[in-house]
Image (spheres, rainbow, N blue to C red):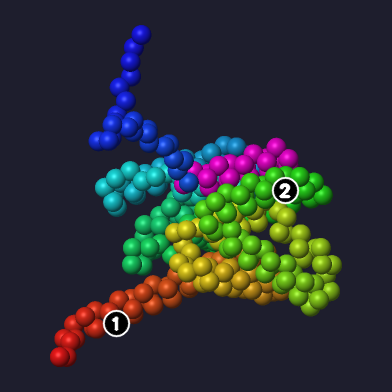
Amino acid sequence: MTARAVAKTPSGSAERPPRVRFDKRYLAPMLVTLVLITGQVSFGFLESWSRTFLAIVTAIAAEMVLGRISFGRWPHLASAYVTGISVGMLIRSPEFWPYALCSAISILSKYVIRADGRHIWNPSNLGIVAMLVLAGDSVAGLSVQWGNNLLPMVVVWVFGAFIIHSVGRFHITLTYVVSFLVFATFRAIVTGHPWLSEVAPLTGPMYQLFIFFMITDPKTTVGPRWAQVLVAFLVAAVEAVLRLFEFVYAPFYALFLVGPAAMLIEIALARRGAAIARRAAAVPERT
């Protein structure tokens, strides 16, 4: 019989082994993989597995190289995986190169477009908008809907709500969804379109990625909770205006405009606060 050594505290009691903690950074990759599998099994909405795989591999490779060059260490790859798989699902092209280029632009933006050590655009949002604007003849966005089969959407929503709530960002998703429904009602009144036709985009897989990943990205959202709610509302408001002007990819453009503006305002206020604090510290106290 073999005896296992048990560490003891100074009082002589056995020390409990450390608990194994789950890294919450893996939650987003798990959810985005669920969206991919659910959408592909239900509707076959991918252009091809090979193109999506290319987008993922490019994003991971770019993250590894740029992270090592910029910070001298290998970065955690959960974010790169989410970016790559999002690109692989959200863009459409008969060619392979847009998938690789979009992933490369997305990851590169994290290291090049920075302010006070923070990147200000959601990577996949910037990459997709760049491709839609610069390569619109070769690239389109995902437009498949779940249709009348709501089960895939319900599955994604249940798991998505649980995961986003567990990382403390469900209020962003909820604010955007409620705002979208309010503005959809307004658009239906203005345009005369059926209300359901204005709400229908929210049921598509593109919006599942948008509401659970893009607008909740911790690295590119403002800090205060009230400000996160305000930004989510403003994204929905700008999207509603763009939809009235028949912008097909309105949510991407809305986040592209509102998100970085909010980040820059927060950074400017932080700089101002730091400057005031430095001036106050430099003034000698009067006795």
Left/right placement of residue 221 relative to residue 182 reads: left
Find residue 154 and name its label: 2
Residues packed near mark 2 inside 10 Å, few (<14), some (14 to 19) or many (20 plus): few
Q: Residue at x 33, y 67 (%)?
A: 116
Identity, as a three-letter code, of the amino acid under mark 2: Val
The image quadrant where one finds the C terminus is bottom left
Q: Which residues are magenta?
A: 25-45
Under tag 1, what secondary structure? helix
Q: Is residue 42 magenta?
A: yes
Residue 279 falls left or right of residue 47: left
Residue at image position (47%, 69%) is: 224
Does 198 appear above or below 57? below
Q: Nearer the viewer, residue 160 or 89?
A: 160
Picture quadrant of residue 266: bottom left
Position of residue 144 relative to residue 5, above or below, is below
Label 1: which residue? 276
Q: Quadrant of residue 165?
A: bottom right
